Amino acid sequence: MFGASLGAKAQNSSPYDLEGAVQIALENNLTLKRSELNQLTNEANLLSAQGNRYPTLSTGASSGFRWGRSINPVTNLFETERIGNINLSLNSNATLFSAGRINNAINQNKANLEAGKFNIEATRNDIILNTINLFINVVFNREQVKIAENQLETTEDQLARTTTLVEAGQLPLSDQLDLQAQNATNQLEVINAKNAFRIAKLNLAQAMQIPFTDDFDIVDPELEIDQNLMASENPALIYETAVNIMPEIAAAQKTIESAEYGVRSAKGAFYPSLGIGANVFSNYVDRAAPGQEPPLFATQIENNLSQSVNLQLNIPIFTQFNNRSSLQRARVQRQLAEVAELEAKNQLRQDIETAYNQALAAKLSYEASLTRVESLGESFRIAQQRFDLGAINSVDFQVAQTNFFNAQADLLNAKYTYIFRVKVLDFYLGNPINLN
């Protein structure tokens, strides 16, 4: 649905922008390729069903020899001579009446083809949405690395200053030891953040179905939050829009339509069917009447030419319950399709409700995190000044530092979670996803 709106452009090497990452993920996804191949089967099924409207036409020839006692087709007498023959035939059959089974089969396959198209579209949407989520996760984890490195840099600066003061006898050794422990902790946090960043890039590369290398990277989009980012519609209104545009719902509805034609086709099996057949036949044998030469091939073919036309009426009386069981299976398939449509609608409604509440929670978390970062940032700035003046010890300084950087990490997480959740709501409203 929104795949085409991305205006994706394929890129051959890192770094990848969002559009390039999505395009490559679509091109390489095997589930999507399988769906597209299955669609070719649907097209072939429709072509086959449409072909049943037209007569069949076939021609054939056979040639052979007979030995022993057999009838000479020229003299109609039993002979024991070897007889060679060539048979030529042309056959055609057509259905005149089938109680709508041919038309119903055509319409059923048309509905299957349409359902397949919508399923492909739904698969594309899932791939795009997943790729965007993984892309944002890479951006988020890169920012986490920056926060961890900033925290480590601050701790290293304070450790260097404290070490100098301890060596000068102005601070106790315990302050230096505390900061050394904090420095080691911050180094581990940087390592963990870089590992998480690497795993985020690995997950994106795997979603794109490309080999992962150390130089794999992305182009960070400008992700900012404005006051109007949150969708104003409530979940019910979003659902009313989404249920009319989501391809998975359309696919479920087309499946019901297909199943209904299947029921009609099964009912048609209870009615008589009428067909017509035509045949043209001729043959040649290499024997003749006694004392005569066999006629020329073309002459004998012309002389032996015969034609026939026949009507075939088939009236089902007892079919070992095959027609009845076929109708029952067709009705069950229709009911299953109706259940599947209801499941798809329920799942869509639940997904929208979940996405809306997650977006709302992320918005509130983001707003609270903004206030928290501002307060703790000021608190950390004052603590740093007081620590430099010796007014507080290293433990108090570490607490203020840790609280501030944890608040920054929480704000970052809330920001990207909020952005992605709102983009999901935009997706359900049929709006193009644009992170820039």
Image (cartoon, rainbow, N blue to C red):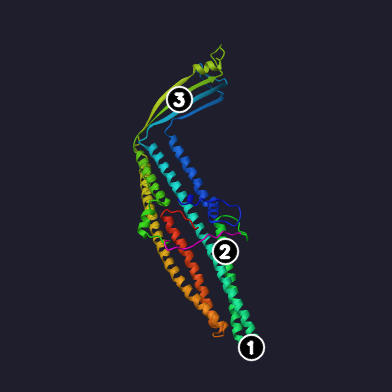
Amino acid on which the number 1 mark rests in the picture:
Gly
Horizontal arrangement in the rendering, residue 26 relative to residue 111 (left or right):
right
Badge 1 element = loop
Q: Is residue 373 above or below residue 247?
A: below
How far apart are labels 2 and 1 at the CA level?
46 Å
Amino acid on which the number 2 mark rests in the picture:
Ile
Q: Could you tell me which residue is drawn at 43 percent across and 47 percent down?
A: 115
* Mark 3: few/some/many CA within 10 Å (<14, 14-19, 20+): some
Q: Could you tell me which residue is drawn at 61 percent across and 54 percent down?
A: 13
Which mark lies nearer to you, 2 or 1? 1
Amino acid on which the number 3 mark rests in the picture:
Asn
Badge 3 element = strand
Nearest to N terminus: mark 2 or mark 3: 2
- Residue at label 1? 169
Start and end of the magenta stretch?
216-228
* Mark 2: few/some/many CA within 10 Å (<14, 14-19, 20+): some
Q: Could you tell me which residue is drawn at 59 percent across and 80 percent down?
A: 179
Q: Position of residue 389 (x, y in %)?
A: 57, 84
Q: Which mark is residue 279?
A: 3
Q: Which mark is residue 196?
A: none
Which of the pair 131/65 is nearer the observer?
131
